[in-house]
Image (cartoon, helix red, strand yellow):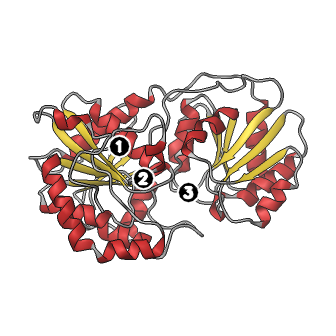
């Protein structure tokens, strides 16, 4: 599962630096999507702290490692492709844990954070705990969304959460659901935070083009994303020469996508968006719409807000707490009439604002500081960390 014993070509520079700093392992072993990017950004947050340095571990096949600005990865791992590959990796678990343990002893982390849970993370948790390293995990979803995930995903997540020292929930909605569904062991501390933006440098500013206002719905095209709700809202709005809509993402074909394609001024692109194209897609938009029927929280929302885009979202799950204090966000009821009214208001609003989320890199640094305070080696885990610019709040352990 792990790479060879020698340093990888993009070995992390911390291996040649002083051991006086607190080394923090940050890992996420997905190949595609936001997980590896979140791990890299969190690692950057730890590196920005005065007394810490990050050790990043990603899948050898992570799409982000093929990008020109690929992050340095100290511990690349061979993961799997498909169910048979996963079964093989799990069958090799004892050997994998032993090999991981050897690498961890050489890398010397004093704390570890899983940026997004996956099927093989129990192996890493086992290796870390055998080496006496306290472990935290960032939980994005407490339960599977309809049509999402695979049968064992949340059973494995629950087993992992009952073995870690700190749980980081990306909304109080997620924290509450983790408690009520039995995912947490008694007394485990829970740190509640909001996901910082996934990109730092805004590209094209909104409305820097001639023509209609551009509305983007971006992400996995799943039932719970409310594509049928968006189709009905757009039908209620009717054709508008001052608005064009683009739905971009990958998912199964559905009646909702067919209804959206049939509407004037609406373009549907059912496809995988490579890591290097995400910024280009977001730069196209003036307004980002999240017409969800349920949600834990959103990764696209903070990134859109950080680049000055308006966000229209339904009041479901953790979206309201994530967005209601944001001046560029409009939160509406999860019905077609409310969504249509919110979209109409966003399209017609000409009171433009610059990026409202501040320095994204600084937000990741504050999150890293809060996690390290809660998980610092050599002291009991304690979630009574300092609140810092609304980035972090606390929920007592259950």
Disc 2 from disc 3: Cα separation:
12 Å
Q: Is residue 380 above or below residue 149?
A: above
Query: Pointer 2: what residue?
Result: 172
Q: Position of residue 349 (x, y in %)?
A: 75, 28
Disc nearer the start of the sequence (1/2):
2
Image quarter of the N terminus: bottom left
Q: Residue at x 88, y 55 (%)?
A: 262
Q: Residue at x 70, y 42 (%)?
A: 216
Neighbour class for label 3 at 10 Å: few (<14), some, many (≥20)? many
Neighbour class for label 1 at 10 Å: few (<14), some, many (≥20)? many
Q: Is residue 283 left or right of residue 344?
A: left
Q: Is residue 95 above or below residue 381?
A: below
Q: In the structure shown, which secondary structural element does the residue marked by tag 3 occupy? A: loop
Q: In the structure shown, which secondary structural element does the residue marked by tag 2 occupy? A: helix
Q: Do the CB atoms of the residues marked 2 and 3 lie less than 8 Å apart?
A: no
Disc 1 from disc 2: Cα separation:
9 Å
Query: Pointer 3: what residue?
Result: 295
Which is more toward the observer, 187 or 66? 66
Q: Do the CB atoms of the residues marked 1 and 2 lie less than 8 Å apart?
A: yes
Q: Is residue 372 left or right of residue 18?
A: right
Q: In the structure shown, which secondary structural element does the residue marked by tag 1 occupy? A: strand
Comparing labels 2 and 3, the label whose residue is closer to the camera:
3
Image quarter of the C terminus: bottom left
Q: Position of residue 319 (x, y in %)?
A: 55, 49
Q: Residue at x 51, y 51 (%)?
A: 33
Disc nearer the start of the sequence (3/1):
3
Determine which quarter of the picture holds residue 317: bottom right
Query: Pointer 1: what residue?
Result: 393
Determine which quarter of the picture holds residue 96: bottom left
Q: Is residue 382 above or below residue 175?
A: above
Disc 3 from disc 1: Cα separation:
20 Å
């Amino acid at each position: 599962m792990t790479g060879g014993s020698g340093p990888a070509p993009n070995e992390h520079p911390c291996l040649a630096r002083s051991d006086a700093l607190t080394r923090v392992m940050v890992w996420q072993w997905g190949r595609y999507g936001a997980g590896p990017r979140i791990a890299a950004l969190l690692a950057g947050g730890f590196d920005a702290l005065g007394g810490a340095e990050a050790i990043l571990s990603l899948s050898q096949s992570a799409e982000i490692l093929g990008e020109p600005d690929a992050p340095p990865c100290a511990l690349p791992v061979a993961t799997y492709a498909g169910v048979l590959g996963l079964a093989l990796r799990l069958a090799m678990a004892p050997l994998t844990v032993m090999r991981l343990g050897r690498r961890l002893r050489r890398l010397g982390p004093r704390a570890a954070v899983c940026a997004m849970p996956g099927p093989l993370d129990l192996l890493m948790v086992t290796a870390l705990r055998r080496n006496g390293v306290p472990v935290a995990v960032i939980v994005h979803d407490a339960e599977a969304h309809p049509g999402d995930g695979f049968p064992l995903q949340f059973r494995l997540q629950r087993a992992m959460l009952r073995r870690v020292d700190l749980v980081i929930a990306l909304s109080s909605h997620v924290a509450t659901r983790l408690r009520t569904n039995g995912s947490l062991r008694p007394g485990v501390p829970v740190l509640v935070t909001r996901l910082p933006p996934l990109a730092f440098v805004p590209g094209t500013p909104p409305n820097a083009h001639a023509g209609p206002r551009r509305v983007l719905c971006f992400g996995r095209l799943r039932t719970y994303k409310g594509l049928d709700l968006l189709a009905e809202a757009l039908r209620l709005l009717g054709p508008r020469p001052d608005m064009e809509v683009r739905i971009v993402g990958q998912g199964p074909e559905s009646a909702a996508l067919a209804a959206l394609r049939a509407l004037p001024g609406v373009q549907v692109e059912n496809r995988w968006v490579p890591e290097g194209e995400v910024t280009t897609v977001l730069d196209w938009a003036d307004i980002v719409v999240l017409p969800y029927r349920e949600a834990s929280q959103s990764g696209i929302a903070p990134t859109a807000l950080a680049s000055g885009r308006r966000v229209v979202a339904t009041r479901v799950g953790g979206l309201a707490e994530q967005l209601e204090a944001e001046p560029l966000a409009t939160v509406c009821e999860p019905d077609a009439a409310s969504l249509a009214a919110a979209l109409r208001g966003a399209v017609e609003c000409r009171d433009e604002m610059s990026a409202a989320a501040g320095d994204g890199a600084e937000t990741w640094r504050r999150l890293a500081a809060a996690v390290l305070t809660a998980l610092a080696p050599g002291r009991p885990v304690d979630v009574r960390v300092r609140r810092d610019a609304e980035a972090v709040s606390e929920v007592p352990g259950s």
